[in-house]
Image: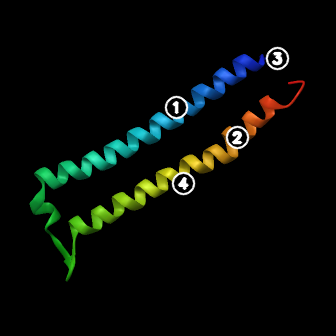
Amino acid sequence: MPTVDSRLADLDRARWRMALTLTGATVLLYFGFIALVAFGRPILAVQLMPGLSLGILLGALVIVASWMLTWIYVRWANTVYDPQVQALMEPGR
């Protein structure tokens, strides 16, 4: 049976993996949008309908996607990470 220390180390690695994955996705999302603003202005200027350009839509989607990435982390922490931490903190484990 694994020791508490090894289970804690595994849990810490899982947390870092999740955090780095979601951080990387967030960085790609934001810097991708900023790069598009810097180098793809004609693309962003495309009018999808009166008053709505592709740039405005993508900007809003960046915000929504960052909320979704945050939700993914919170859900993972609540359903996976926190119960495992609680289990490690129980006496006799």
List the residue tagged with mark 3: 1
Q: Residues within 10 Å of mark 2 (few under 14, many from 20)?
A: few
List the residue tagged with mark 2: 82
Q: Residues within 10 Å of mark 3 (few under 14, many from 20)?
A: few
Q: Nearer the viewer, mark 2 or mark 3?
A: 2
Toward which corner of the image does residue 44 lie, by quadrant? bottom left
List the residue tagged with mark 4: 71
Q: Nearer the viewer, mark 2 or mark 1?
A: 2
Could you tell me which quadrant the C terminus lies in? top right
Seen in the image, is 69 located left or right of residue 79? left
Q: Is residue 92 above or below residue 55?
A: above
Could you tell me which quadrant the N terminus lies in? top right
- Name the secondary structure under disc 3: loop
List the residue tagged with mark 1: 17
**Spatial distance from mark 2 to mark 3, Cα to Cα?**
21 Å
Say what amino acid the circle numbered 4 marks. Trp
